[in-house]
Amino acid sequence: MSKEITSRKEDYAQWYNDLVIKGGLADYSAVRGCMVIKPYGFALWEEMRDQLDQMFKDTGHENAYFPLFIPKSFLSREAAHVAGFAKECAVVTHYRLKNDPDGSGIIVDPEAKLEEELIVRPTSETIIWNTYRTWIQSYRDLPLLINQWANVVRWEMRTRLFLRTTEFLWQEGHTAHANAEEAIAEARQMLDVYTDFVEHYMALPVIRGVKTESERFAGAIDTYCIETLMQDGKALQAGTSHFLGQNFAKAFDVKFSDKQNKLDYVWATSWGVSTRLVGALVMAHSDDEGLILPPRIAPVQVVIIPIYKGDEKKDLLDARGKEIAAGLKKAGIRVKFDNNDNNRPGWKFAEYEKKGVPLRIALGLRDLENNTVEIARRDTREKKNVQADGLTELVEKLLLEIQQDIYQKALEYRDQHITRADSWDEFVKLLDEKGGFISAHWDGTIASEEAIKEKLKATIRCIPLNNPLEEGLCIFSGKPSRERVLFARAY
Amino acid sequence: MSKEITSRKEDYAQWYNDLVIKGGLADYSAVRGCMVIKPYGFALWEEMRDQLDQMFKDTGHENAYFPLFIPKSFLSREAAHVAGFAKECAVVTHYRLKNDPDGSGIIVDPEAKLEEELIVRPTSETIIWNTYRTWIQSYRDLPLLINQWANVVRWEMRTRLFLRTTEFLWQEGHTAHANAEEAIAEARQMLDVYTDFVEHYMALPVIRGVKTESERFAGAIDTYCIETLMQDGKALQAGTSHFLGQNFAKAFDVKFSDKQNKLDYVWATSWGVSTRLVGALVMAHSDDEGLILPPRIAPVQVVIIPIYKGDEKKDLLDARGKEIAAGLKKAGIRVKFDNNDNNRPGWKFAEYEKKGVPLRIALGLRDLENNTVEIARRDTREKKNVQADGLTELVEKLLLEIQQDIYQKALEYRDQHITRADSWDEFVKLLDEKGGFISAHWDGTIASEEAIKEKLKATIRCIPLNNPLEEGLCIFSGKPSRERVLFARAY
């Protein structure tokens, strides 16, 4: 047991922070609410980013880059958007510093005040749709399928590493279409892409649904989402995909002429996932010894650790370790051979457990004689001695098994934590004692939704796609309801 | 001849802008000095970024990510640094907007004023070295080899697409070492990496040198640089690598204990290249018809265009085009088959010339019968009919040839434009009439350097590495000089 890491039982929030900081993923910074993503954490984000980027390109999208700054007036153009995003954001008011006349340092030069303040982008719909006006004239310019990888800033009051930070990294897709059907199909397609990624790479089962009006993206007609469940029973929104209708096209006057030469406003979508996914990954699978990472996105899939006895046969162990590493690397496996003399094997074992490396191969003197290795799984902590012949095939098989087992474990936990509630008392009890998703009737009004949120801090996570219709009575108001929705406390 | 693109002779600056905008690389934005990088331009940057990233990783560096914002006081910590960077930068003073009480829109909330202003990073030495203080305790933590891909902001008064923009994308390496020798070796190694990249991927010959004191990075002991030459005879700095000594370690109190347990300040380097390289690439090789891109970083290396005659055998041409594309793709060649019906072949020919695709394959009905294709080089505009058998090998050979020929052409131009001047009159005449690098004696004083800059707008681009010593008289002051340096007018 790692003394460094607080156990989940003792303090779940502290456990998470310990994993992130002691696992080498991120660190606090000198700027309130902003974090430093450390090399291991960034390598993990790179694996996720590269996979998503390939999926976006495979579905016909291209990357571009738009300005960090948004003129203040742009935010006001779309009525719902300004209400949602113009609140807590970083405002650039000046463009120059100068030496303080009293000699005590540097001050903002009052003469370098901007005529119009610039907002550090909290999201880029406005600046992008302002640009699309010049890019789109005719149906021939559509669909326009663009994605951007960028940093964004939202001035959050309470921040948590990866889960909610003032600055975060994300991708934002912004597409333009000739009609509503195509735009809706695009928004749904990207929800499929996110589902595929989160389930098959992050090994995290999702519930796919649509948000209620009050939880929708500011400016959207419909917000599709994928919702995941963490080990403490709280939900976490892993990604959203919005059908924006013609709202932004109207706000920024983006029209196209169709095949009949008739002018109409363009239809839009936007969709995004962020470094928040790293937080979800950490919380979903890890244990009290440290991180557990799914092999498909683990920066290091296999670590090889030589067990020296003084200098005896050190060269032979090193040579053998490198040989095994080369063999695995050749098969496309991300492998690290750690023969750093500064640290003892026991320290290394604990370190790579903490970092969630899926497989550990230990190599001792006896293994040299017997042509064997010891192989250990991070997720189950099982270990066994195996013949070195056929090791690559074994490693490939085990990585696949681990990927599937981690997903299966998360799926079982999630399925055990979708519970029906048919009375208010039952609803409250479930929220407080069991957690997870609670499937309950809702009368469809914002008033009931807000009241539940205020009383219990539970929100409607989504109305699942293909939700069966069922007559019932709202858990809060007792008024008639047509379907159940999923409630949860959430990150 | 493309009517859309102004010729170099007519207006070199306009030619460059036409290439960037009409070649689909970038666009102006609604924010002063910030550009939009369009999909084709971003794809080019991705090719460059991915190649550089691999080179950084191959030399032992890891990526990380540090905050966008820097507390104002951090800039003041290093005396030279603040003088160089605290001037023209974007300053965040507030963190909230609110509805204007008079109902006319949104305004900055005067109550949400930051206690200490935040600067949008113009470069990250300060925030990174403030972080390194907690990461570095002992020689075991060194060397620390970190790189960051990020956006930075410098409030430039005069901007030009890619070459000088208020916001730009770049990478900045920041390394920490146990002694000066190691740090200098690192700074030199990264100059080698940049040289390798710019010469062998961008096909652009460089001069390697060191900057004079007044041209040095603010806070550096030595700034190494690579200088390139554009077609109008002006120089362009393509990358810099700085030996920072212990300046930032002292400013941020970063010490380590060595093997003898003695405390000392850490030694530093930083090094960077930016989206400016895209501008260099455009200017260096292109002609009056459009871009000319080196095959190794061209987003599309080969375009295949079918020449339909009405609908006759359209299916056969499409099938054959796809077959050829698949064959090239299998060999790792970036190929596009353009059978878009909206555009005619002639339009496509001009379009891909404008976009600088290195090779064009045209496929007509007769080619189907004869098992041939027409293949055309973008750089020389030569075309010929060839047998389709062995096409992949031919394409590979031609791409290699184009890469070498483009480099050779730029090298010859560059070598013809390094000229010695031994008198002031000769110096002025060369600058005004021939351009390029002028190799002349300099007395080593800032006074002479500044006077030349003021009179002629020419700067010392660098003192070449391994510069031969040679007695002479300063071109400006007539005072004794020990070596020639390279002057030029520059971007």
Image (spheres, coloured by chain):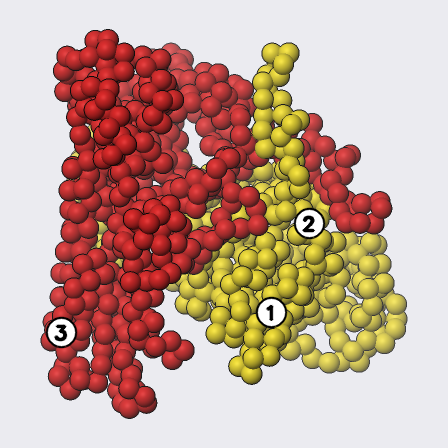
Chain colours: A red, B yellow
Left or right of A29 in this view: B360? left
Residue B75 locus on image (x, y percent): 68, 52
Q: Which residue is mark 3?
A: A385
Give above or below for A89 relative to B208: above
Inspect the image, locate mark 3, and give the three-letter code of the amino acid beneath it.
Answer: Asn
Q: Which residue is mark 2?
A: B73
Q: Is residue A486 left or right of residue B54?
A: left
Count of marks overlaid on the render:
3
Report whether A10 appears left or right of A328. right
**Residue B157: image x %, image y %?**
70, 40
Q: Position of residue A150 (x, y in %)?
A: 46, 42
Q: Residues within 10 Å of mark 2 (few under 14, many from 20)?
A: some
Instruction: Kindly identify which numbered label has been placed on residue B255.
Output: 1
- Chain to which the residue tagged by mark 3 belongs: A
Badges 3 and 2, same chain? no
- Which of the chains bears the disc numbered 1? B
A138 with respect to B219 (left or right): left
Q: Secondary structure at mark 2?
A: helix
Quadrant of residue B413 in the image?
A: bottom right
Query: Looking at this view, is B152 or A181 the one in front?
Result: B152
Can see residue B458? yes
Dot 2 amino acid type: Ser
SS class, disc 1: strand
Q: Can you say which quadrant of the picture contains the N terminus of chain A?
A: bottom left
Residue at the (77%, 53%) spot, across then down: B457
Give the Cα distance between marks 2 and 1: 21 Å
